[in-house]
Image (tube, rainbow, N blue to C red):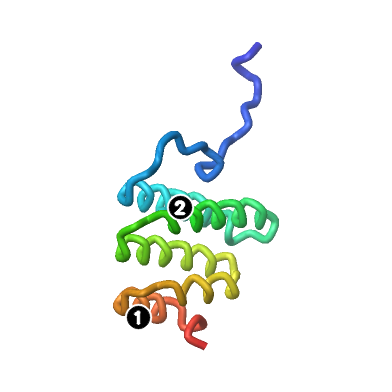
Amino acid sequence: MRWFAQKTRQDIWDEAIEAPLGDIDAAARIRAICDAAAASAAGPAQSERYDRAARVAMEIAMKISDELMRDDAVRRIVDLCMKANDLKTAQILFRAIQADWIREAVQRDHPALSQ
């Protein structure tokens, strides 16, 4: 009976990207990845899922050409890193944010990054 066969759950960051993403689609995908991985980031037992999600999100973010959209996407990834207590990665990504107002908002949300 195939109805009851257990299907393996595929995470959004494991899904193949069929065509090149535009900036808006890439930002939406990063948002979806960060939202889906937020629960994994909090638990130490699921750090492998967080690592994969963060890596895929960073790869997508590097391909965004619009600076503000890229900065916003990186901000979401920084939030994910902070939920996972991955301060080292969060600090590296924080330094990549170029828009002053986004940097200030991230500093306000995560004061540990400014140290």
Which residue type does callout 2 highlight? Ile
**Residue depicted at x 46% and y 38%:** 17
> Residue 101 at what x, y percent from top left?
29, 77
Residue 65 in the image: above or below residue 88 = above
Image quadrant where one finds the N terminus: top right
Residue at figure coordinates x 30%, y 50% from the top left: 24
Which residue is farthest bottom? 115
The residue wearing badge 1 is 104
Rendered position, 71 above or below 18? below
How crowded is the residue under tag 2: few (<14 C-alpha within 10 Å), some, or many (20+)?
some
Total number of numbered discs in the rendering: 2
Query: Mark 1 belongs to which amino acid?
Result: Glu
The quarter of the picture where residue 43 lies is bottom right
Mark 2–mark 1 Cα distance, whole angstroms, equals: 23 Å
Q: Is residue 96 left or right of residue 69?
A: right
> Which circle's residue, 2 or 1, is located before the other in the chain?
2
Residue 78 in percent (x, y) is at 48, 67
Q: What mark, if any, has residue 60 been given in the picture?
A: 2
**Residue farthest along the top direction in this orientation:** 1
**Left or right, residue 84 beside residue 79:** right
Q: Is residue 70 left or right of residue 7?
A: left
When the figure is inspected, residue 83 is found, relative to residue 56, above or below; the finding is: below
What label sits on residue 13 in the rendered view?
A: none
Q: Position of residue 86 (x, y in %)?
A: 60, 70
Mark 2 vs mark 1: in front: 2
Judged left or right of residue 8, residue 28 is: left
In the structure shown, which secondary structural element does the residue marked by tag 2 occupy?
A: helix
Counting from the top left corner in percent of width and height, residue 91 is at 53, 76
- Residue 81 in which image quadrant: bottom right
Label 1 secondary element: helix
What residue sits 40% from the left and 53% below the top?
31
